[in-house]
């Protein structure tokens, strides 16, 4: 089973966290909880308010939008990162397709990171600006 330190590469691949230093990524990993879930468990529900970010460490998840399967996610994949920034509704429902191990970061823990490490806020803003620019470019093309 992967160790908490091995999660750093996965966290670094998340666009929201890509600009963080190794030390900052270690703090994110420390603030998160490792959980195991059984196959079939609903992790997030489309339309409901989001409160946490999920990084898949082991297993697979099924993503559905409007009751239609749109994706399968596996180790290293993630979902719910926007829930760290706002309390907007989830854009899809995600189920555990198999037994899973997840790294989960809640809004409260994320807010605590921003308070103790204020330097990461500007890095996160840059990451969000890039995401918005990319979405804008796709919308125009």
Image: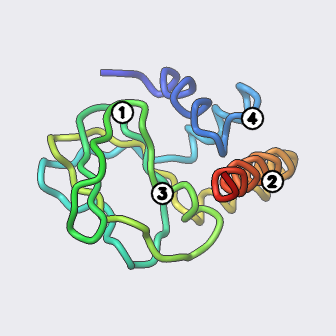
Q: CA distance from mark 4 to mark 1?
A: 20 Å
Q: Residue at x 15, y 41 (%)?
A: 98
Q: Is residue 70 above or below residue 45?
A: above
Q: In the rendered picture of this protein, how many numbered marks are placed on residues?
A: 4
Q: Earlier in the sequence, mark 4 or mark 1?
A: 4
Tell me where residue 56 appears, x and y as whole percent. 37, 39
Q: Earlier in the sequence, mark 4 or mark 2?
A: 4
Q: Which mark is residue 57?
A: 1
Q: Is residue 125 above or below residue 29?
A: below
Q: Residue at x 82, y 48 (%)?
A: 126
Q: Earlier in the sequence, mark 2 or mark 3?
A: 3
Q: Is residue 91 left or right of residue 19?
A: left
Which residue bears the numbered disc 4? Answer: 20
- Of badges 4 and 2, the one in the foreground is 2
Secondary structure at badge 4 equals: loop
Tell me where residue 15 appears, x and y as whole percent. 64, 40
């Amino acid at each position: 089973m992967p160790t908490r330190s091995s999660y750093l590469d996965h966290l670094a691949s998340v666009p929201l966290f890509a600009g963080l230093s190794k030390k900052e990524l270690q703090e994110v990993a420390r603030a998160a909880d490792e959980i195991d879930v059984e196959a079939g468990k609903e992790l997030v529900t489309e339309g409901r308010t989001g409160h946490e970010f999920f990084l898949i460490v082991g297993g697979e998840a099924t993503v559905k939008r409007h009751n239609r399967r749109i994706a399968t996610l596996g180790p290293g994949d993630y979902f719910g990162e926007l829930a760290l920034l706002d309390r907007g509704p989830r854009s899809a429902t995600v189920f555990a397709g198999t037994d899973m191990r997840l790294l989960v970061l809640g809004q409260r823990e994320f807010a605590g990171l921003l308070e103790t490490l204020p330097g990461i806020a500007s890095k996160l803003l840059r990451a969000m600006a890039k995401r918005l620019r990319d979405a804008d470019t796709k919308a125009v093309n």
